[in-house]
Amino acid sequence: LRPLRERGQRIWRIAVVGLFLGALAGCTSLVVNVVGSVLWPALSGETQHPLRLIQVFLTFPLGARALEINSGVALALGCVLYLATGMLYGMLFELVLSTFLPHANVGARLVACSVLALVVWAVNFYGILSWLQPLLFGGRWILDLVPWWVAAGTHLVFGWTMALVYPLGVSR
C-alpha cells in the first residue's frame, strides 16, 4: 500500500502547488494584459477598456453581450474565472515540471514552459475554441477579437511565470 499512498500524496501535492502557482501566473498574465490595454491607445490610436481581454474572455459563457460590459460584478467575476482557468493550467504545468524537470535550472524550465504554453495556446485557440464557441454561442469572438500574438504572448507570460515560481512549490 505504500506506493499507492505515496502516489496519492504526489497527486495531492501537484494539485495544491499547481493551483497556487497557477494563480500567481494567472495574476501576472492578467496584469500584463491590463498594462498592454492601457498602453494600446498610445501605440494604435484606438482606445480600449483596460479589461478588454476579460470582456472577450467572457464571450465564452455570455456571448456577444459580454463585449458591452464595462464595469461591475460581471468583470470582477470574469477576472475570477480567468484566474481559476490559470489555476487549472497551473496543475498541468506543475505536473509536467515535477515529472520531467524536477531539478532543472531556470533556463531549461523557461524553454519547457514556453513550449508547453504555446502548445496550450494552439490547442485551446485552434483545436477547441475555433469550433466550440461558434457551436455553443454562435460566434468566434475570442479568435476574432484577440490577435494571435496577444493570445500567444499571454500564454507565454503565464508559462514564464510558472517557470520562475516553480521553485516556490518544490518541497525541501
Image (cartoon, rainbow, N blue to C red):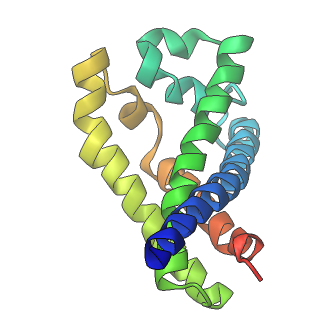
Residue 59 lies, in percent from the top left, at 46, 21
Q: Is residue 67 left or right of residue 37?
A: left
Residue 169 in the image: above or below residue 92: below
Given residues 88 and 28, the one toward you in this image is 88
- Identify the image quadrant of residue 31: top right
- Identify the image quadrant of residue 121: bottom left
Given residues 102 and 35, the one toward you in this image is 102
Q: Residue at x 69, y 25 (%)?
A: 49
Which quadrant of the rendered structure holds the N terminus? bottom left
Res 133 seen here: yes
Residue 14 in the image: above or below residue 126: below
Q: Residue at x 49, y 77 (%)?
A: 2
The extreme front residue here reads 1
- Identify the image quadrant of residue 68: top right
User: Disc count in the image?
Assistant: 0
Q: Residue at x 67, y 55 (%)?
A: 25
